[in-house]
Amino acid sequence: MNVIKQESFLTEINEGSGYVLNVKLSEDELNRIREMIHSHAVSLVSKFYPDLKEKCEQTPMDEFHTLSELIDHKKVWTKINRIFPQEFIAEIKKMPFVDQLNTMFGEVKAANEEDLYEEEIYWRFVRPGQKNDIGPLHADKWFWDLGHGEMPQDCFRLKIWIPIWCEKAGNGLRVVPHSQKDNYKCDKEERDGCLKPVFNENDYQLDVLPLSNKSGESVIFHDELLHGGCFNSMDKSRVSIEFTMLVKKENV
Ligand SMILES: O=C(O)CCC(=O)C(=O)O
C-alpha cells in the first residue's frame, strides 16, 4: 500500500476541499457497468410490467425516461430496488478501480445501509427536468445519525459517486467544497415510513459547485460534505452508481 499517497488523499478529504477526483473507470469497466445497470433495469421493470420487457430491452438506459408514462417511477425505482443483485456487486468488487480504492484506503468494504446484502452498491436514475429525482443537498452523516445503517466501530465512512451516463460536465453531482469542516442545522421528517433529514440550503449562503467529472470519473468525498444532484437540464437521463465505503481506522 502506498501510504504517502493515501495520506494526501485523506488530507484533501478531511482538511481540504472534502473530495478527490482521481479514480477513473477504464472503458471496459464503464461499459460492463452500463450493461449491468441496463440488464438490472430491464429485469426490474419486467417484474412489475412483464409486457414492457421487450420495449425496455430496446431502450438505451439514458433514454429510459421516454418510458416514464408507462412506468410508476416511485414504485419501480425505489432505493432498495436499485441495489445491484449480489452477483453484480461481487463482479464490481473485483474490478481494477476497486483495487485502486484498496490501494488508497486499505481493504474497503461497501456498507449495507439498507440491510439487504452484506455489501450494497446501487445506482440512481435521474430523468431530464425532474427535480424530484435528484438527491437534495445533504451530508451523508445525517442519514446515519437518523439510524440508516449500522456502523462498525472500527471503521469510518467515505462515499464514492460515479457518473455512468452523464451527458455533460456540470450536470452530475454538486458539492459545497470545504463544508465538511462546518456545522449545518438540519431538521428531520418522516417520509415513506422512515426518518429523513430536511435541509433548507437557502438558510445559508453556500458556494455550491457543480463538479465537471465525466462518465466513469468518480468523486470520493467526506461523510459530512454537503452534496446533492444537479438538476438534469439535458435531454438524456443521468445514471450514476454510488456506495458508502467503510474504511478501517487502523489502515490509515
Ligand atoms: O445523483 C444525485 O442526484 C444525488 C446523489 C447523492 O445525493 C448522493 O450520492 O448522496
Image (cartoon, rainbow, N blue to C red):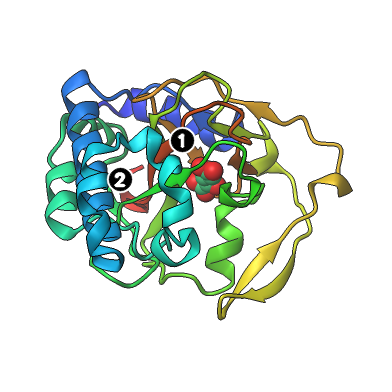
Q: Residues within 10 Å of mark 2 (few under 14, many from 20)?
A: some
- Whole-angstrom CA distance, mark 2 to mark 1, is 38 Å
Residue, x 60% and y 49% (percent of image)?
224
Question: In this picture, is 244 found above or below 19?
Answer: below
What's the residue type where badge 2 is placed?
A: Asn
Q: Residues within 10 Å of mark 1 (few under 14, many from 20)?
A: many
Residue, x 12% and y 41% (percent of image)?
94
What's the residue type where badge 1 is placed?
A: Ser
Query: Which circle's residue, 2 or 1, is located before the other in the chain?
Result: 1
Mark seen at residue 163: none
Quarter of the image for residue 80 reads bottom left
Any part of residue 177 in sight: yes
User: Image quadrant for the C terminus?
Assistant: top left
Residue that label 1 marks = 237
State whether label 1 is within 8 Å of ligand 1.
no
Residue, x 38% and y 58% (percent of image)?
155
Any part of residue 1 in sight: no
Foreground residue among 79 and 154: 79
Mark seen at residue 251: 2
- Residue 124 is situated, as x and y percent measured from the top left of the image, at 42, 47
Q: Nearer the viewer, mark 2 or mark 1?
A: 1
